[in-house]
Amino acid sequence: GAVVSQHPSWVICKSGTSVKIECRSLDFQATTMFWYRQFPKQSLMLMATSNEGSKATYEQGVEKDKFLINHASLTLSTLTVTSAHPEDSSFYICSASARGIAAGELFFGEGSRLTVL
Amino acid sequence: GESVGLHLPTLSVQEGDNSIINCAYSNSASDYFIWYKQESGKGPQFIIDIRSNMDKRQGQRVTVLLNKTVKHLSLQIAATQPGDSAVYFCAESVTYGGSQGNLIFGKGTKLSVKP
């Protein structure tokens, strides 16, 4: 299957700082990328959907000014957690799709674990 | 509505036995379903999918059953192996105007395989 890479895989930061997580599709062009967050022992919660070259669409309850998403190219989307607080500590996962969610055409990254001290 | 779990159900099976993982989905309009496997500290991995015009689909060692009447999905794993130990999520999606909507994930089930 296609490969989606996330970086960093884990990061520890101080409260109040900003953290950027990258999501790259390595062998295909991702027209759409999705960002999820996952708390321990819980399911994946969709945060936002981003299409290349346009503004991200955020799910209800997700602060767009806090979680900045940029999808500047067909192979890269970034999620920046601004002014991070301990409650933002979570596992952030991206997924990418070239032709839409169907028949396994949605590929997930390995996740990025954020710990805010 | 969405189903978000606060506690992870656990299924413990003996190596070599068959496993059945169940999922109740919430939206009767959902017409596409996927099962994912997530190992600790990793992203979800696609296992098998099924559309609502089918009630059964088989893959390699896995079978997905769909019962639209009671909004129930199950994943059967034959001859379960230690490498199958992971958390399994079902996900549902609705087709809008020819486009597939976003995936909504179920609460997940942790499968533990005893050697």
Image (cartoon, helix red, strand yellow):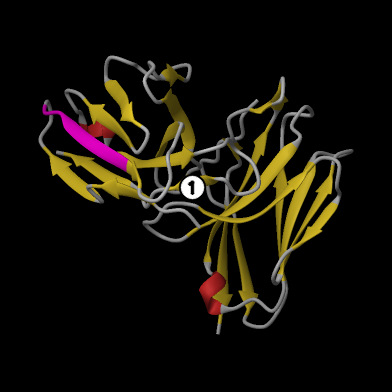
**Magenta-span inclusion, residue A116:** no
Residue lying at 13% horizontally and 30% vertically, measured from the top left? A15
Start-end of magenta stretch: A17-23
Residue B6 position in % (x across, y down): 51, 41
Is residue A115 placed above or below A17 in the rendered structure?
below
Q: Quadrant of residue B75?
A: bottom right
Residue lying at 44% horizontally and 41% vertically, measured from the top left? A95
Question: In front: B102, or B105?
Answer: B102
Is residue B41 placed above or below A101 in the rendered structure?
below
For mark 1, does the 10 Å Cα neighbourhood hold few (<14), some (14 to 19), or many (20 or more) residues? many
Residue lying at 70% horizontally and 79% vertically, measured from the top left? B17
Q: Secondary structure at mark 1?
A: strand
Residue B94 position in % (x across, y down): 70, 29
| Residue with the most extreme right position | B69
Is residue B50 placed above or below B25 in the rendered structure?
below
The residue indicated by pointer 1 is A107
Residue lying at 43% horizontally and 52% vertically, measured from the top left? B43
Residue A55 position in % (x across, y down): 38, 16
Residue A111 is left or right of residue A43, and the answer is: left
Residue B26 is left or right of residue B83, and the answer is: right
What's the residue type where badge 1 is placed? Phe
Residue A93 is left or right of residue B46, and the answer is: left
Question: In front: A83, or A73?
Answer: A73
